Image: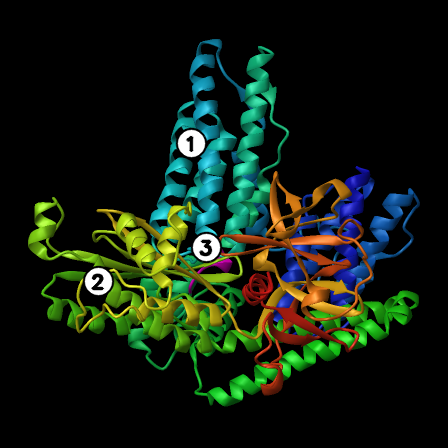
Amino acid sequence: MKNEIEKIKRDIDEMVRLVKDLDVEDIPVLGELLNILSGMEGNELNGSDIPFKRLISAIKTYMGKLILEEEKDPGPVIRGTELLRGMVLSADSGSDLSIDMADIMASLGVKDFSTSMVLGPPEEASKEADVDQEIPTHVSFDKEDVAILKDFIAESRENLESIEIRLIDLEQNPRDKDIINAIFRPFHTIKGVSGFLDLKRINILAHKTENLLDSARTGDIVINDMVTDVVLESVDSMGKMLNSIDAAIQSEQFSFEEMLDIHPLLGRIDRALIQASETKGKPLGEILIEAGTLDAENLENALTIQKTTPQKKLGEILINENIVESRSVISAIRQQKATQQGAQQVKVDTGKLDNLVDLTGELVIAQAMVRQNLQRIAAQDQKFYQNMNQLGQIVSSLQKTAMSMRMIPIGSTFQRMVRLVRDLSKNAGKLIDLTMTGEETEIDRNVVDALYEPMVHMIRNSVDHGMEPPDEREKKGKSRAGLIHLRAYHKGGNIVIEIEDNGKGLNKDRILEKALAQGLIDRNDVLSDAEIFELIMRPGFSTAEKVTDISGRGVGMDVVKKTIEGLRGRVEIQSEEGQGTTFIISLPLTLAIIEGMLVRVGNERYIVPTLAILESFRPSLEDYFTVEGRGEMTKFRDSLVPLLRLDRIFNISMTAAHPWEGIIVVVENKYEKKGLLIDELLGKDAFVIKSLGESLKGIKGLAGGSILGDGRIGLILDVEGLFKVCDENG
C-alpha cells in the first residue's frame, strides 16, 4: 500500500507541475493530464477511495469540456488537483482532511455532491460495470485437463517469446505487414486455445490485443510507441497469468482466484487504438462510427434526412435528432479539423530551413551554457530548477521539430533507380526487376542528396557484375529475371539502406587473387569474409575482365566508400556465391548532431563518436605490454590491442603519466581495434556539430568541433583518421 501511495504522490506532483501554467489550447498537456488521471483511477487510497475516485472522474469530465472548448477556465482543474494532493497526503500521514469538497466539485460541474454517486454519463458507468462482470477472477479446471494445460502453457510461453523478438523488428519497420502478421498469429492461437480451456481472462486480453493488431494489419492504425508498449504489457500480463496457472498445477490446486487486474490494461489498449487511428481525410460519420458513438443504420438515416434538407450539416442533424451527443460530434469535428490542418503543406526555401536548424543548434548550446553557469543557484531555488528543466524540454522539442522539418522520405531517391535499372538492364541484355520497401522512411535532405551517387554505383555493379544473363540463370535453376531489392528502415539512431540482388554473388578466391596481384594484401594474411569483401572498395580495384559502358574501371566502389564515410556512415557487404550480394549502408539520421562520449585529456576535451566505442575500462599494470614492431599494447577481452595516445598525436600534456593511471576507451574502425588513452570520461550526450573552418580542415584525426556547456570547445575525433595517423607514425 505504501508503494502505491508513493506512486500516486509522484503522479500528482507531475500534475501539479503541469497545471501551474495550464493553457486550455495546449492539447498535448491536457492529454498528458488525462493519461495520469486514468492511471490513478484503479488505485486504492484507504478510506478515501470513493471521494478520491469521484474527484478524479469529475476532473476528467471537466477536462473533456476544456478539450471540446465547452469550458474556458482551467481554474477548477487546478483546485481539483490540489484537493487530490491533499487527499493523498492525509492518507499517507493518517490524518483527517478538513477541506470541504462540495465547492470544488460544484466548480467541476458536480452540483449535488452529497447524493451523486456516479460521475460522468450513465452509459459509461454501466459500460464499466459490464466489463467488470465479463472478467471473472475465479479460475478452475478439471484434473483431466492438466496435461492439455501444460502443453498450452509451454506453447504460449514460446509464442510470447517470439512476440517480444518480433516487436523489436516492428519498432524498426512499423508498417511491415509480415512482421505484424507474425505477431498477430501467436495472439490468435492463444485466444483460441484459452477460449477452449475456459481461461476467460487470458482469452479476453488476447482477443483485445488481437483486435489492436488486426487494425494495424488492415491499415486502420499505424504502429507507434504507445501501441508497442501496450502489446508488451499484454505479453507480460499473459506471462504472469500463465505462471499463476502453472503454480496452481504444481500445487494441485484446481481452483483459485486470479489476482492480476487486467482492466486498466484493457483501457490502455482502447486508448492506444484511438490515438493510433489515421483519421486523415475521413468523413465525420466514419470518425463517429469508429469512436463507437454512431452505428451504420443511424448514419444512413441521418444522410437520408440531409438529402431532403441539404442546407443542414450532418453534425447538426445528428444532434437535433438525438442520435449522437453534442460533445461527441464536437470532438469528432475538432479531430477532423485537426487532421485536415495537419495535411496542409507550405513550400519553404531550404536555405531558411538550414538556417533554422543552425539557430536551433545555437539555442541548444546557449541553453546548456546558462544551465552550467547557474547550477549552484538552481540547487538552492527549487522553482528556478523546475523552470530550467522546463526550458530544457522546450529547447529539446524545438530542436527535434526543426530537425524533422528538414527530413524527407527516401522514396524519391529510390524511384530514380527504377529508370536506371531499366536502362542498364536493357543495355546489358539482362532481365532485371526492381522492388522497394520502406520508401516512406525519412532522412535528412542533405544526406539524401549525397546518397544518390553511391546508390547509382552500387546499382551499376549489381546489374553488370552481379546479375547473370537470362539463359545462364535458367541453367542454374533460377528465374530468368533477376531481382534487385531496395530496402530502407530506421535502426537505433541510424537509417539503414540495403541494396540486395539475387545474382551470382562475390567470388572470394578471385577477389584475393586480384588483391595479391595489385599488392593490396600479403599471401600470408588471414582475412575474414567481411575483410575480403571490403577489398572491392579499395581505389582502382576491379575483378571485371573487360571494361564496359556500365562498369569495370574500379572507381565505383571507391567513390561509394569515401562518400558514405564522409557522411559519418559505413558500408558492409554480405554475399554468398551463387545466391547474391547485399550492400548495407548505415547513416546518421542527420548531419547536424552527433551522439558522443565527452572525454578529458589533460586540459582538453574531445568527443568520441558513440558508434565507434566498444568499451571503456581502467587497465592494471598487468594489462600493459610492449610488443616489438607493434609498440604499446593493452589487454582487451583476452587479446591485445594497440594503444593510441591522444596526447602525443595532438602534442598536449595529460594527467596520467602511465596507462594504468588513466582510462582506455576501445574504439573500432571497420575490423580494427585500438585503445584511446584518456584521463577521464565526462559523460555521453548529443553534440551540435560545428565546422573547424578551412584553416583546420585538413587536420587528420578531427571531424569537427562542438561548443560545450561551459563555453569551451570540444573537438570531435575522426576515428578512422586517428588510426591512419597511428599507422603512419608506427
Within 10 Å of disc 1 (Cα), the crowding (few <14, some 14-19, many 20+) is many
42 relative to 279 in the view: left or right:
right
Residue corresponding to mark 3: 172
Residue 720 shown in magenta: no
The N terminus sits in image quarter: top right
Q: CA distance from mark 3 to mark 1?
A: 25 Å
Residue corresponding to mark 1: 190
Numbered circle sitting on residue 544: 2
Q: Tell me, yes or no, if residue 66 can be seen here.
A: no
At x 55%, y 21%, the residue is 245
Q: Tell me, yes or no, if residue 190 can be seen here.
A: yes
Residue range highlighted in magenta: 273-278
Within 10 Å of disc 3 (Cα), the crowding (few <14, some 14-19, many 20+) is some
Label 2: state its secondary structure.
loop
**Closer to us: 506 or 727:** 727
Q: Amino acid at mark 1?
A: Ile
Figure label count: 3
Label 1: state its secondary structure.
helix
Mark 3 vs 1, N-terminal side: 3
Label 3: state its secondary structure.
helix
Residue 360 in the image: above or below residue 138: below
Query: In x, y percent, where is residue 262?
Result: 58, 38
